[in-house]
Image (cartoon, rainbow, N blue to C red):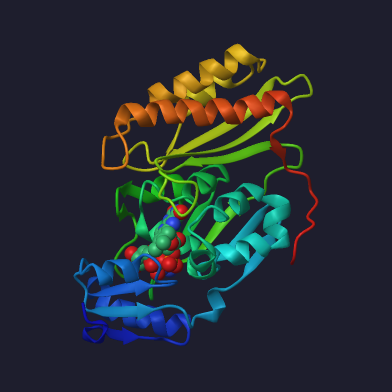
Amino acid sequence: MNYSQYVVHSPQNLNEALGILKEKASEIRLISGGTDVMVLIKDNIIKEKELLNLSFLNELRYIHEEGNTIKIGALITYKELEKSKVVNLNAPILVDASKTIGAAQIQNLGTLAGNLGNASPAGDSIPPLYVLNASVKLQSADSERVVPVSEFFLGPRKTKRAPNELITEIAIEKTKPGLYYFFKKLGLREANAISLVSVACIADLDQYKKVNSIKLALGAVAPTVMFAVKSEKLATDKQLDLNLVDEIARSVSEEISPITDIRGSAEYRRRAAYGLVYEGLYEVLMGTAKRVSGSFEGVY
Ligand SMILES: Cc1cc2nc3c(=O)[nH]c(=O)nc-3n(C[C@H](O)[C@H](O)[C@H](O)COP(=O)(O)OP(=O)(O)OC[C@H]3O[C@@H](n4cnc5c(N)ncnc54)[C@H](O)[C@@H]3O)c2cc1C
């Protein structure tokens, strides 16, 4: 592999970037933090010979609050999410997931847009984005559209992004204070591991632990991240107790459609999904799960 064989375009603003993309479209590979792309280059598995380096587009580095929505510019990194007061207060599940993505080096460079663009069913920011009702803004030189994240993926490595479009923004819904949430992932080792299974959950329970509503999204168990729709329905309006925790976890393990690959068998993934959902809901039942608190002690 020889890096010098690539022609790198480094536009200084969004208009310039969209202009280059309009002209080159599928001949050019977008690169933000480069934590996926550089691995592909090293392994010689990208076909494009030109790179569109987005890292100078400072207009895509922002986190804005707009009513019930948080708008996140495409170049925001995991570390910036972890330090953001507005994200910690209103979408802490995304902070928890960001902290599990690679190690510090990856979190300093990797972006949400890159995780979406990479379109791996094991992308760890994606289940939280599902339960946060996220949407993805796609911009080209001539148009702009917004796609719900749950409709963005067409399969492994396939998305609705057209070759002349960039992801420029991700919008998420704020989570109401008091709601329970958890993000859990299982890999082949404790840290710096690709998920074998991941689960994101946001649940609204009343003071007697009756489930008013619940969202459960799972990663690495189907061609795309998926909502466990049947299991969510099963849980809704029921009193959470040990039997229901077991029933929901079993239902999730039956609802997913995992494959067997080098990291684990389909059966192992079903059991792991059962275990992660059981553990998370057990913590909700016992009152030890995290709740959106509306307070933040970290560094802004
Ligand atoms: C050691 C290591 C550990 C890792 N650990 C994890 C982990 O635990 N969990 C996890 O989910 N991932 C992990 N990753 C993968 C990677 O870090 C993430 O997917 C990250 O979010 C990619 O972001 P990036 O900005 O670096 O993307 P890049 O590498 O720049 O791009 C990734 C893909 O997205 C496309 N893209 C980039 N920007 C845009 C844009 N604005 N619009 C449209 N498409 C775009 C690129 O063309 C490319 O196809 C790991 C990677 C490494 C090397």
Query: Looking at the image, which residue sits at the far front?
Result: 189
Q: Nearer the viewer, residue 186 or 273?
A: 186
Give the x, y percent position of residue 106. 48, 65
For the point 72% across and 39% down, which residue is it?
291
Give the x, y percent position of residue 82. 64, 60
Q: Is residue 125 left or right of residue 28?
A: right
Can you tell me which quadrant of the image ligand 1 is in? bottom left
Q: Quadrant of residue 203 in the image?
A: top right
Give the x, y percent position of residue 122. 39, 47
Q: Nearer the viewer, residue 105 or 91?
A: 105
Is the residue 231 above or below the residue 50 in the image?
above
Is the residue 139 above or below the residue 274 in the image?
below
Q: Is residue 198 left or right of residue 224?
A: right
Q: Is residue 114 visible to us here?
A: no
Is the residue 189 above or below the residue 265 in the image?
below
Q: Nearer the viewer, residue 17 or 92?
A: 92
For the point 49% across and 44% down, which residue is it?
127
- State the count of labels: 0
Q: Is residue 198 left or right of residue 67?
A: left
Give the x, y percent position of residue 66. 68, 60
For the point 35% across and 51% down, which residue is it?
120
The N terminus, quarter of image: bottom left
Q: Quadrant of residue 178 in the image?
A: top right
The C terminus, quarter of image: bottom right
Q: Is residue 226 left or right of residue 39?
A: right
For the point 36% across and 82% down, which residue is it?
19
Q: Is residue 221 visible to us here?
A: yes
